[in-house]
Each structure stands twice: as structure tokens, then as C-alpha cells.
Amino acid sequence: MRSKSVPSDSLGLPAGAGIEELTVRAAGDGMRVACTIGPRPGFSRLVIRFRTDGATPATPTDGRPLLDVPAVAGATFRGYHHPLDRGSVYSYAAFGLDDRGSIQSTVMVCAWPSAG
């Protein structure tokens, strides 16, 4: 698997208040996805979406859903996304949303499986 990460954008939140990391790694017939929230999240909900058409999800309703959970301070959410289409690039975006649904933090990652 090869991947390219785009740094998080915490939209003015103090250090430790955003999404700290989103990682995607090939594993078997799928991808292992992990997202870590800072110790003092400035948001209440974590949403991860994905697309396979060459674009990265731009909003919490764009693309297809992978995860939608309450944000927990310092937590790392892990999931297994499968099966994969080995001919596709998977673009993931994690969104930290406040109680009104406004985006407070984002992280984006593109990944694709290795051949074979």
C-alpha cells in the first residue's frame, strides 16, 4: 500500500483539540483505518467518509460512510475497511464536528493497495 497524508486542519482550535492522526494501511483484503483524537477535543462527533472516484470527501456527507461515533478525548478509533477493489485509489477524510454539525477539524489520507 502506498499512501499520501494531508496534515490536519484544526480551524483555529488549540493544540490537542483536533484530530491528531488518520492512518490507513493495507491488510489482507482490506485496509486498517485508525483515527486518533486529541486529549481535549474541540468537537463532539467523529465522522470518517471515503471515495474511490479520485476525489477526497469534502464534507461529512460526501462519499460513502465508514465511521460516525461520539468523539472521546484521547481515543483512537480502529476499523477494518473491506473488501477492496485493487484497481481503485481510496480517499478518506475524517471530520470532527461540533454539536451543531459544523466542521472543527479535518484530516485526509489517500491510499491504494499494493499489487498482488
Image (spheres, rainbow, N blue to C red):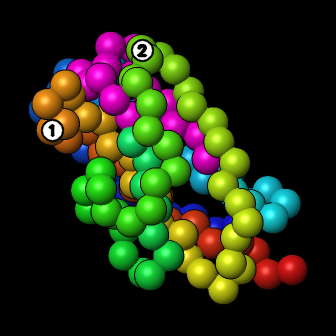
Q: Is residue 8 visible?
A: no
Which of labels 2 and 1 is toward the front? 1
> Which residue is at a point 79% across and 81% down the rendered structure image?
115
Q: Is residue 87 visible?
A: yes
> Which residue is at a point 33% across and 43% down the rendered structure image?
95
Q: Where does the N terminus fall, quadrant-wise?
A: bottom right
* Residue tagged 2: 73
Where's residue 55, x and y in %?
Answer: 36, 76
> Which residue is at a point 29% across and 51% down the rendered structure image?
60
Relative to 80, say whether 35 is above or below: above
Cα separation between marks 2 and 1 = 18 Å
Where's residue 49, x and y in %?
Answer: 43, 55
Label 2 residue SS: loop
Where's residue 84, x and y in %?
Answer: 70, 70
How would you rate the neighbour count of disc 2 (Cα within 10 Å): few for under 14, some for 14-19, many for 20 or more? some
Q: Is residue 102 left or right of residue 8?
A: left
Label 1 residue SS: loop
Relative to 102, say whether 63 is above or below: below
Relative to 104, say whether 50 is above or below: below
* Residue tagged 1: 102
Identity, as a three-letter code, of the amino acid under mark 2: Ala
> Which residue is at a point 45% across and 69% down the rendered structure image?
51
Q: Quick check: is 35 in the magenta stretch?
A: yes
Q: Quick check: is 15 in the magenta stretch?
A: no
Mark earlier in primary sequence (2, 1): 2
How would you rate the neighbour count of disc 1 (Cα within 10 Å): few for under 14, some for 14-19, many for 20 or more? few
Identity, as a three-letter code, of the amino acid under mark 1: Ser
Checking the image for residue 112, the label placed there is none
Total marks in image: 2
Magenta-colored span: 33-46
Relative to 80, say whether 83 is above or below: below
Q: Where does the C terminus fall, quadrant-wise?
A: bottom right
